[in-house]
Amino acid sequence: AYRQGVRYIVATSHRRKGMFETPEKVIMTNFLQFKDAVAEVYPEIRLCYGAELYYSKDILSKLEKKKVPTLNGSRYILLEFSSDTPWKEIQEAVNEVTLLGLTPVLAHIERYDALAFHAERVEELIDKGCYTQVNSNHVLKPTLIGDRAKEFKKRTRYFLEQDLVHCVASDMHNLSSRPPFMREAYKLLTEEFGKDKAKALLKKNPLMLLKNQAI
């Protein structure tokens, strides 16, 4: 990430009942230890605390009780769904979260079948106050053969062309199957949408969210 030019990283490990249930205290302890280790090697990197929250009634309850983190202590949360979550459920989830006084940042919107090539649906969610994020690897152009992410890349291109994306982030899990592609995404966005747009998606807008500011 450092070599790619990244200087702000938000640790957004998964929170999902029945799948990712590591106690919050353990996650926070590990985060603080990791943050100290990073600071020794890369003092320029700012590591922030957060979570990728899979929407459920359980998560909604934990949000209300402040038992799961927002993004860097802001009013913004990174909200995730299954790829086949129905449109009605996404609408209901957004309504429930906003009633808590929180603002959803919808994680990797290109993955959700209910939103695919539906500009009007994404516009509706944005009008409700949501922000949207797409993954940096899906900004890249599809390869001709064996590209399992080809459909997600097509959807991402559609959302970008419709001006429905607020942030591009890595969704990095590791250096093998889920590495960051931030530099490559920035280069392509600059070439096709201009430097101002690229900077807004990869730097300006995400930084505003971390500072608890509206985009």
Image (cartoon, helix red, strand yellow):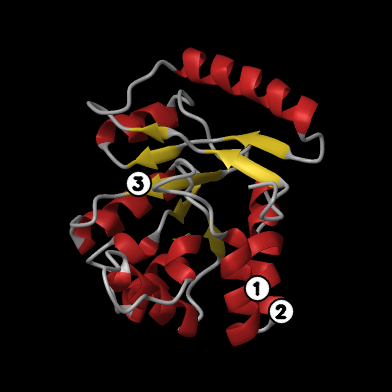
Mark nearer the viewer, 2 or 3 = 2
Q: Is residue 154 left or right of residue 37?
A: left
Give the spatial CA distance, label 1 vs label 3.
32 Å
Tell me the crowding category of disc 1: few under 14, some 14 to 19, or many 20 or more residues within 10 angstroms, Cα based.
Answer: many
What is the spatial separation of the Cα atoms under label 2 and label 3, in whole angstroms? 36 Å
Which residue, given by chain and number where applicable, does mark 1 sit on?
A: 198
Amino acid under disc 2:
Lys
Say few, some or many: other residues with alpha carbon within 10 Å of mark 2 (under 14 / 14 to 19 / 20 or more).
Answer: some
Q: Are marks 1 and 2 in contact (CB under 8 Å)?
A: yes
What amino acid type is highlighted by mark number 1?
Ala
Secondary structure beneath disc 2?
A: helix
Residue 69 x/y as whole percent: 52, 31
Badge 2 or badge 3: first in the primary sequence: 3
* As drawn, 17 above or below 160: above
Tell which of 69 and 170 is nearer to you: 170
Mark 1 vs mark 2, CA separation in Å: 5 Å
Using the image, determine if residue 27 lies above or below residue 211: above
- In the depicted structure, whether residue 35 falls above or below residue 172: above
Residue 65 image position (x, y, % from top left): 44, 24
Say which residue label 2 marks: 195
Query: Which circle, 1 or 3, is nearer the viewer?
Result: 1
Residue 98 rendering spot, x and y as whole percentages: 44, 49
Position of the C terminus by quadrant: bottom right
Q: Residue drawn 46% across and 41% down?
A: 174
Kindly check if marks 2 and 3 are in contact, taking CB atoms under 8 A apart as contact: no
Which numbered disc covers residue 96? Answer: 3
User: How many callouts does the rendering have?
Assistant: 3
Q: Looking at this view, is 132 or 144 the one in front?
A: 144
Res. 86 image quadrant:
bottom left
